[in-house]
Amino acid sequence: MRAAGTSRSRQLWLVAVFSFLLVAGAFSQASDDAALAKDFQDRVNHYVELHKETGVGSKTSDSPDKVAQEKHDAREKIQGARASAKQGEIFTPRIGSYFKRQIAATMQGPEGAKIRTSLRHAEPLPHLQLKVNAPYPQKVPLQSTPPTLLMNLPHLPGKLQYRIVGSTLVLYDVASGLVVDFLPHALPPA
């Protein structure tokens, strides 16, 4: 009888230890995710500072010609300030993994079917060769990101937007029309 009591105590102890490890692991992941989200925000804020330093977005006009010229000027200023920019400076490998986890969790959640449907109904995009610090192709539509997906991604300042090209998540600069950074294979296969 004593062996049964010892076995039961050992089982309870193992369950307690396992539960503690699960909670500790979840807390650790949440803490790591918060740090990654902050790192992303810091990188985005650093980019937005370029707008202030170069005067991008300070002018506004109702004239389509002047708006196009302002966008062109903004593009040149940002490109000059980020001449050596490359993919992964904002979506670092660790930040990219964080985004992929957030997107996958959202796609597997109750809104996942709606998000997939929304993405399928968007205008199909040709295979694009995206390049950081290069203009988003002018004659290619900017596919918006479904709002239910945006709710689970870090908030962006008004000068930047998330865009989707196939399975790639793009960080897009509205004022200059530039690709700030992109994350390949961000969306899981349908």
Image: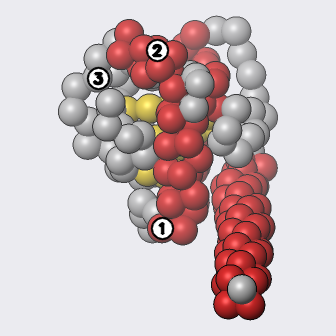
Q: Which residue lies furthest to the left in this view?
A: 127
Label 2 crowd bin: few (<14), some (14–19), many (20+), radius 10 Å: few
Q: Quadrant of residue 55?
A: top right
Kind of residue at badge 1: Pro
Residue at image mark 2: 118
Can I make out residue 121 in this image? yes
Q: Is residue 77 left or right of residue 54?
A: left
- Mark 2 element type: helix
| Mark nearer the viewer, 3 or 1 | 1
Mark 2 touching mark 1, by CB under 8 A?
no
Q: Which of marks 3 and 1 is nearer the N terminus?
A: 1
Of residues 110 and 162, the one drawn nearer to the viewer in this rendering: 110
The residue at the point 59 percent across, 25 percent down is: 110
Q: Quick one: 128 or 29, which is closer to the camera?
A: 29
Task: Please name the residue that numbered disc 3 is placed on.
Answer: 125
Residue 19, x across and y down, in percent: 73, 70
Q: How many marks?
A: 3
Query: Of the numbered discs in the image, which one, if any, rests on residue 61?
Result: none
State the residue lying farthest toward the front.
1
Give the residue pinned by disc 1: 93
Q: Which of marks 3 and 2 is nearer the N terminus?
A: 2
Spatial CA span between label 3 and label 2: 14 Å
Q: In the rendered structure, which disc, 2 or 1, sits on the residue that comes first in sequence? A: 1
Point out the frontmost of discs 3 and 2: 2
Taking the image as shown, residue 159 lies to the left or right of residue 68, namely right
